[in-house]
Image: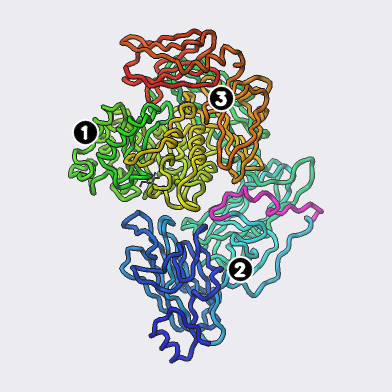
Amino acid sequence: MKKLFFLSSMTLAAALTANADVIALADMDLSYITCLSGEAVHKNQSTKGTDLAIRGKVYGGVGTHAPSKCIVRLNGASEFHTLLGITDSAESPSQKANHGIAEYTVTLHKNHETEVRATGTISRDDAAPVEVNLTNLAGYEYLELDFATGTQPWADHCAWADARFTYSGTAPATCSGLYTEPAAPIVQLPTTGPNGEQIVPLSSLDISLIQNGWRTPQANKSIEQNTLTINGQRYASGVGIHAPAKAVVKLNGSATHFHCEIGIDDEAGERASANFVVKVRNTSGAERSIASAELHRMNSAVVVDCDIQAGDKYLIIEVGDLNDTNEADHVDLANAYFHFVFQNSNPPELVSPDVLSSTLNCATVLFSQPGVRFMHRLHSNNPDATFSVNNLPAGLTYNERRHLVEGIIKQEGQYTYNVLTSIPGEDPVSTPISLTVSSHLQQPTPFMGWISWNTIEGEISDDVVRKACDGMISSGLFDAGYTVICMDDLWHAPSRAADGKPQANATRFPNGIKPLADYVHSRGMKLGIYSDAAGRTCAGAYGSYGSETIDANTYAEWGIDILKYDYCFAPTDRASTITRYTTMGNALKASGRDIIFYGCEWGQNSPWEWAAQAGCSTWRVTLDVRDCWEARSPGVGVIQSLAQVKDLWPYSGVNRFNDADMLCVGINGKGKSSSDLCVGTPGMTKTEYRTQFALWCMWGSPLGLSFDVRNPISATDLAIMTNREMIDINQDKMGQAAEWIGVDANGCNLLVKDLENGDVAVAVVNMSNNTQSYVIDFNQIAALDPTATYAVRDVQRCEDMNNAIGSISIPSIAKHETKVYRLSKGTTSIVETLAAKSLDNVITEVNDSNVTVKFPGTDGASKRVILSDTLGRVFGSATTTDTQVTFPTPSSDLIVVNVVCAGRSISKVIRR
Ligand code: GLA
């Protein structure tokens, strides 16, 4: 039987002459072919299910998405032919940076030896596909076809077009891996130690706590779920991981011995290599190296066998990628086990490697404003840690029960105090805390505004910025607090001016940036600009690396108020990242203009630990947000935002905000790159947009809207963006991020945020796909007193609820809905309830000397009033039971008045 599909007549003739059979790759079992998670492998179609077309020509063959691998057992086949290309379904790199580029490799294998027969790069911009013709395949056992992503796995829609084998006898066939046969005898775990000790296999511990370079660690399997096999030797027990990886085992005083055989699994590709170190850290923090070695494919396992000594606290296994890429570094911790002798102590346990990183895992460089309540929440990833605090400045106290420093400092100044962190059995560690109290902070509350990227991309222009400004004012968004207009990437001319200064695209910004900034300022708003800490920006314009000073000075001349500083094309190590941000931070400081420095390295090097010192007052903590509930990796839908931001709360504070990226409300699936990488179609339900908005408010993330300002905006979308009481939680002057308390079995997440006036915001996020009920138990929330009465305000609906003691029962939370409540302690009196209702009647009067805020109908009720500028810089604050309060008139043209009473919060922007 001849099997002939999608072959040219030439091939058919050749096959007939040679009296051989031909089989198309597309006719083999494609389920063995792996591709980027979430993408598909298709027969005779692109990965997207469209025609398998390259440059307009339609082929038969296999469509896939890099990274992708196909292994064919040759069974004596004699020839192979294919065309390699990016299908027309993808965007090209000339249209979108990093899209539609992949690297291909065609490898032959025999006797565990490999021969790369073709390798190179294909791009959607190529004029024609790359042709690969292999003849004389006799003696080779496997053919391996690989597509690797270029810099990013974006739109790498690859094709093995017209791929076919010539053979006689048994047809070649796809398979799951190389050299799975013959099987050597399998190494079994010992049943006891030499002195009768119990055996605790590493694979029986919580292996999800291992930090792992790719996919998830596997118990008793390789990372690709095959039998653990190192150089032909198979193992019954162990853990399959991928470099770079780190496992930390807390020994708990009763593990006496460790054994492990470490090597590269045979399933790994040719380029696999790694190195490892096994060491032990004792209770005083001293480390002892046990073993270290380089690992290469088809080398025998390295045996690690050591006794554990008294005082050894952690066993640490670090696996590196040997300074190449981490590609194919499938490492097995085979036959890995501990001897355990019960001594009233727990068996060894895997713990998060974070326990080693620092004893104090929270902000150590903090900011506050004079007269405003301050809070510093101490946190260690080590659950055994306890704290004490000394040298506190006047006005601050340590709340031992809640592990927080709190209070009000009245005087501006630079303060220092010490936190002593103790872990049982280890020497305490003292950490100095720096606290700057100033009325001139860059960003006292998270900035609120509009950012061009998600819907405008390369169409950013003078006209769009003016429209954004005018639109913010006419829609009421300006009055709601959105006062920053930020131009993202691609505002640039093709190159710098002859004198090295940055310059804007002359067609889209015919008058340059300065007159535009003047216009934005004349409307009471602030203008942001974008650059990158490398030679190029993410979308390919010129970057600022090496030109930091001239750029910062020019931005200052132009009247720029905020710089978003991206990190594409820059070195990825932490030291370089810190240096590059610090250089620009210093240049901005030296420019003489107050420019907010907004870091954007996507959380890759934990900017929450160092970016404040580099001069940033906010920093991105995720890759790019997508306009969807769930995104495919590496995109970030709401699901991924929650996963990535939820534990970063200890690092947020006044003038140091974790940025969860642009808000998608108003985009409704019509964005540009924000509409990529969505599971399902882009866009979210209104409930989901409300949840995204609520999370950003709870976290104190900047509120950067990104809808298309050139089109009308619906009343519903506007209502989400302007929910005053929600915004007040975001703009709270104490700058806390909500602590993530946990998630219940139904997928309901609980978040809690302390607010400046002593209120507490509590959010319940239903991440499940069903309606749920939920009981907020005040015993779970350290910020609440379970015996006290609280006035409860539903912040999503801006409605009062019944007072609560001890708990709030929520009968129904819709799929993906978030309930947010603002709780005020002890306000059950009729006076306060009426006063809170009367806040709608607040009257503000301003003249050259005084601002008077009057609250008719609130006599006797306690109110907190704060006056600030639109960036949150506080001019005055007061707590009063009177019906009016007076402040000296500040110099700012726009004044934000915020009044909070019994859980209700009212803000007004007034002009002098
Ligand atoms: C990166 C950033 C985005 C946007 C684009 C512009 O992807 O993370 O927010 O600025 O670059 O090219």
Instruction: Tell me the residue at 48%/91% (across/down).
Output: 19
Please give the residue where the numbered disc 1 appears in the rendered image: 515
Percent x, y of residue 311: 69, 40
Circle 3 residue: 793
Q: Which mark is residue 231?
A: 2
Label 1 crowd (10 A; few <14 / some 14-19 / many >=20) = some
The answer to whether 53 is drawn above or below residue 437 in the figure is below
Residue found at the far right of this picture: 196
Marks 2 and 3, the one that precedes in the sequence: 2
Marker disc for residue 56: none
User: Is 884 situated left or right of 562 in this image?
Assistant: right
Q: Is residue 197 above or below residue 183?
A: above
Q: Which residues are magenta?
A: 194-215
Whether pointer 2 and pointer 3 mark residues with C-beta atoms closer than 8 Å, the reply is no
Q: Are marks 3 and 1 in contact (CB under 8 Å)?
A: no
Quarter of the figure that contains the C terminus: top left
| 19 lies left or right of 557 | right
